[in-house]
Image (tube, rainbow, N blue to C red):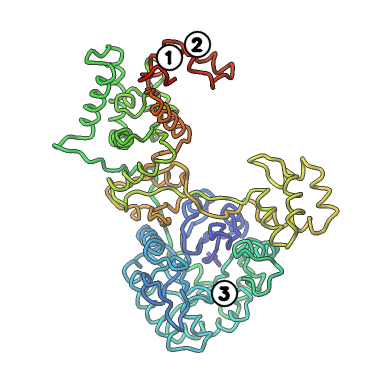
Amino acid sequence: MGFVHLHCHTQYSLLDGAIRIHDLVSKTQSFGQEAVAVTDHGVLYGAMEFYDKAKKAGIKPIIGCEIYVAPGDMRSREQIPGMPKNYHLVLLAQDEAGYRNLIRLVSMAHVDGFYYKPRVDRAALSELNKGLIALSACLQGEIPYWLLRGNEERANDALEFYSRTFESRFYLEIQANGLADQETVNPQLVELGRRRGIPVVATNDCHYLLKSDAKAHEALLCIQTQTTLHDKGRMSFETDELYLKSPQEMEAYFHWVPEAVDASAEVAGRCSLELPRGEYYFPVYPTEDGKSLEDLIHEKAWAGLKARMGDQIPEEYARRLEEELGIIRSMGFSGYFLIVADYIQYAKANDIPVGPGRGSAAGSLAAYGLGITDIDPIRWNLLFERFLNPERKSMPDIDVDFCQSRRDEVIEYVKNKYGPQYVCQITTFGNMKAKAVIRDVGRVLGMSYGDVDRIAKLIPNDLHMTLDEALKVEPRLRQLMDSDPMVSRLIDIARSLEGLSRHASVHAGGVVISDSRPLVEHIPVYMDKKGMLISQYDMKRIEQVGLIKLDMLGLKTLTVIQKACQILKGRGIDLDIANIPLDDKATYDLISDGDTSNGWSRLSDRTRSSCTTRSATSS
């Protein structure tokens, strides 16, 4: 197979790695290599994106992580004297069992072991190492860390633990990064490996794609640490060798220990991960009295429709409801509808405003009967087939709007009902857009705020605008770049960093409920400051792994409507917002005239009848 890169940091090593996944895959192809690994710091944010893109390109994806290992108990928040806060260790998934254990370890590191960094400990590694290959990592790895400090006792203790824990799946890692300490420790690691019978493997700890990207990466580190390039003592790698080197460069660098290059191919050959696709993992809706989900949804949908329309249901409605329920049952979505109906009912029962329905779900009479929507699809001639179609197998997508200020109460209800280990929100990534990256890099270069602001304002206000496009459409920007070397440097660095992920945050509406197994059986998670689990995969990857996404959106308009109704009630007017007429001409004339401040006196009797006044003066 030849040399294989086993230690690479993508843009998902936030503000540390600068390799875009599609560039990593493309460059690997151009080298004629058959495999490559991604080992982001402490996270698996990009694992699924990498897996899919590498597979599509015919490259073997090796999913890994450079994890942090606590020197003691990962749950302890006390600094051990004479010890670092953490060590590094590279873990690579050999197979699905290894991938599942990697998910558990990374999640555990965030939920239980976070102290400056997400950490695991030796106990966790002893328990969850099946299917994982371990590499001793960079200069912050436990073994090289103590070798450099002349403490062979601690280095040997670490070697003993890792070789015993991972058995034949542990490798001593030597790197071609050009750092002075690395040049010192590499021969020591090789000698230690030969003496103890531990194989040595060559890597390069790649943080950027090309050697010419080193300066841009230096700026990226300054963005992370909120420093400038002029600051003394700032975080810096002091090398320009952390790029994706060709196999020939790696072979030349390690000509004195060719077995380390061969070992990279050996490790790649031992990794063969195939992940299942096309399965759905539905949440478990609790039922009573031995009823099936299908019986329950049938019972609730009919009861809800009768509550809306009376016992005499028109034949057209009865036929449509039975047809829809048949399709829902055949597609296996009964539980999904019951879950959505349940948390909507909770919101309504607790006076939390809920939207009447939006999107294609409004075309479902079953949703209308279950109380998911308040829109009669037959009255408004809405099509169920736009929502669910047995000829197009896809998950139903029911977007539900809740009062913005009380949405968290509904999420808390779901979390309590299904269990905190089974419910999470979804991560999303903020990228460095054209204007933002100009401002970030300008600060790093030490430019004045006024100069940077003037340049940023030349970039057109377009959500999809790029710096390359801005240079085409804004001649003043190109003129500044051509005439001012500092502006030219600013834009060159900004173009290298544009589009990289800057931070992880929480998706505005997405909530995931797992099946009978906790979330960490499916996906890696982290925890926010409120104690809520957040998926490490974004919305698209959540759907790809088969978990069920529920859209629970916060809508400010509902909050405003509720407050308006409360103000009216305080003035003696009870307004039933769900039953106001939708075709009242006087109301539309009032809005068209822009005379809403004098609205009550102009409303028709028909509209006023939807309000109950308690006093003649309340209007």
Q: Which residue matches tag 2?
A: 585
Q: Which residue matches tag 3?
A: 175
**404 over 69 or under it: above or below:** above
| Residue 578 occupies quadrant | top left
Instruction: Identify which residue is drawn at 47% across, 72% down.
Output: 88
**323 over 177 or under it: above or below:** above
Is there CB contact under 8 Å for labels 1 and 3?
Answer: no
Q: Quadrant of the C terminus?
A: top left
- Amino acid type, callout 2: Lys
Instruction: Identify which residue is drawn at 39% across, 41% down.
Output: 406
- Amino acid type, callout 1: Thr
Instruction: Identify which residue is drawn at 38% across, 24% down.
Output: 572
Q: Which residue matches tag 1?
A: 607
Q: Secondary structure at mark 1?
A: helix
For label 3, the crowd category at 10 Å Cα-Cα, with few meaning under 14, some 14 to 19 and many 20 or more, is many
- Amino acid type, callout 3: Gln
- Residue 71: x, y in percent? 41, 77
Residues 478 and 356: in front is 356
- Determine the CA span between mark 3 and mark 2: 76 Å
Q: Earlier in the sequence, mark 3 or mark 2?
A: 3
In the shown orientation, is residue 381 left or right of residue 32? left
**78 over 537 or under it: above or below:** below
Q: Secondary structure at mark 2?
A: helix
For label 2, the crowd category at 10 Å Cα-Cα, with few meaning under 14, some 14 to 19 and many 20 or more, is few
